[in-house]
Amino acid sequence: MNKNNTESQFQILRKIADNSKLTQRDLSKELGYSLGKLNYVIKELQKKGLIKMRNFKNNSNKEKYMYILTPKGLIEKTKITVQFMKRKMEEYDELKKELNNSKKKLAKN
């Protein structure tokens, strides 16, 4: 899975975990994704068994769905979160080294 797709899946899993009643339109607006991209990623998450879609039972608009994180989806979200945090910590360490090297160069001049 490529980095952008992993990041998209992570963002969608986070949003669904926070509020399972968001519509695709709501999710696309909040995440800044086109409806096409969002629909594609949601279908991939469903194929992997990470989310389930359910109709709102008491809603007259049967096109509205509720997205539910499956136990497998929760585990995957946790794994992706850990990977994301590791990557950000590595980026922070690299930036800190760069900053320290720049400070040393400036101090020499």
Image: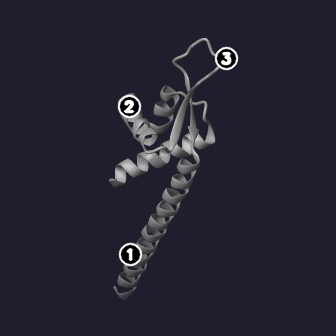
Q: Nearer the viewer, residue 87 or 93?
A: 87
Q: Position of residue 43 (x, y in %)?
A: 41, 35
Gap between marks 3 and 1, in whole Å?
57 Å
Gap between marks 1 and 2, in whole Å?
36 Å
Circle 2: residue type: Ser
Q: Are marks 1 and 2 in contact (CB under 8 Å)?
A: no
Q: Is residue 41 above or below residue 109?
A: above
Q: Which residue is mark 2?
A: 34
Q: Nearer the viewer, residue 61 or 89?
A: 61
Q: For the residues carrying marks 3 and 1, which lies nearer the camera in this image? A: 3
Q: Residue furthest right?
A: 58
Residue at horizontal 40 percent and vertical 32 percent from the top: 39
Gap between marks 3 and 2, in whole Å?
28 Å
Q: Residue furthest top?
A: 60
Q: For the residues carrying marks 1 and 2, which lies nearer the camera in this image? A: 2
Tell me the crowding category of disc 1: few under 14, some 14 to 19, or many 20 or more residues within 10 angstroms, Cα based: few
Q: Which numbered disc, 3 or 1, marks the residue that appears first in the sequence?
A: 3
Circle 3: residue type: Asn
Q: Which residue is mark 3?
A: 58
Tell me the quarter of the image containing the C terminus.
Answer: bottom left
